[in-house]
Amino acid sequence: MYDRTNYSDYVKLKEFRKRILADQETIEVTDFGAGSRVFSSHRRKVSAIAKNAGIAAKRQQLLYRIVRYFEPKNILELGTSLGLGTAALSLGNPKAQVVTVEGCPQTARKALDSFQRLPPENIDLKVMRFEDYFDLPAPSQWDLVYIDGNHSKDRTLAYFHQLLTHTHSDTVLIFDDIHWSEEMKEAWLEIVRQPQVTVSIDTFFWGFVFFRTAQPKQHFTIRM
């Protein structure tokens, strides 16, 4: 978390972000989640989405370092948006298979356009609702899952329990915006209490969940 190395891939992430921030196209956003606190309309400029709702540059770099450190082979992202997080997942381990799910067709189209410049050999973008994706055949186990989508308690808990059947001792789950609302706080605390969770970390913006069977149950709070 505190690695200060200036990785060369940071330049690629910066250029990826720069191109999206320069995109002035207006798209119609289909929102299946808890809505937006920033936008009052579903018609939004791509640049505005990236600026106000996309993953921040420091968190994008942290996500890259997490993937680089754990070297997950099978990665799932729920909530592609414009692909800023996906780029970090992809570059963090080019040998991994990154499946990313986005419910909004127009947002997914913009992300796919951006992926062509990475290049996206290890990115598989699924345009569908998360619930529909869970109905499809999936890898028996995920090594890392980044959940940045529907910010409701019921849906977050449902995703957690659906993912449980595809975890192993070294799986890492990352929940975004765990303090976004009282509902999300409740969902996060309920996840932490689950007997399958051995280690949990609250960084305020992200919640990390581990399932290491040889480790006693512990919870950490880290402000970053």
Image (spheres, grey):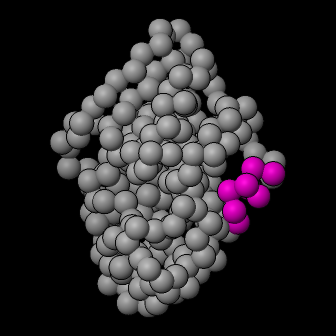
Q: Is residue 118 above or below residue 219?
A: below
Q: Quadrant of the N terminus?
A: top left
Looking at the picture, how far across and down is residue 137, in whole percent?
A: 81, 48
Q: Seen in the image, is 136 located left or right of residue 98?
A: right
Q: Is residue 59 visible?
A: yes
Picture coordinates of residue 183, whole percent (x, y): 50, 46
Residue at image point 20% right, 49% down = 6
The residue shown at (62%, 60%) is 101
Magenta segment = 128-135
Of 131 and 169, the residue lying toward us: 131
24 is within the stretch colored magenta: no
Whether 172 is drawn above or below 96: the answer is above
Identify the residue at horizontal 63%, vertical 46% (top origin).
154
Report x, y in % for residue 83: 48, 66
Residue 133 magenta-highlighted: yes
Looking at the picture, how far across and down is residue 195, in whole percent? 60, 17
- Choose between 206 and 98: the one closer to the eye: 206
Going by the image, does 142 lie left or right of 217? right
| Relative vertical location of residue 93 with respect to residue 115 in this rendering, above or below | above
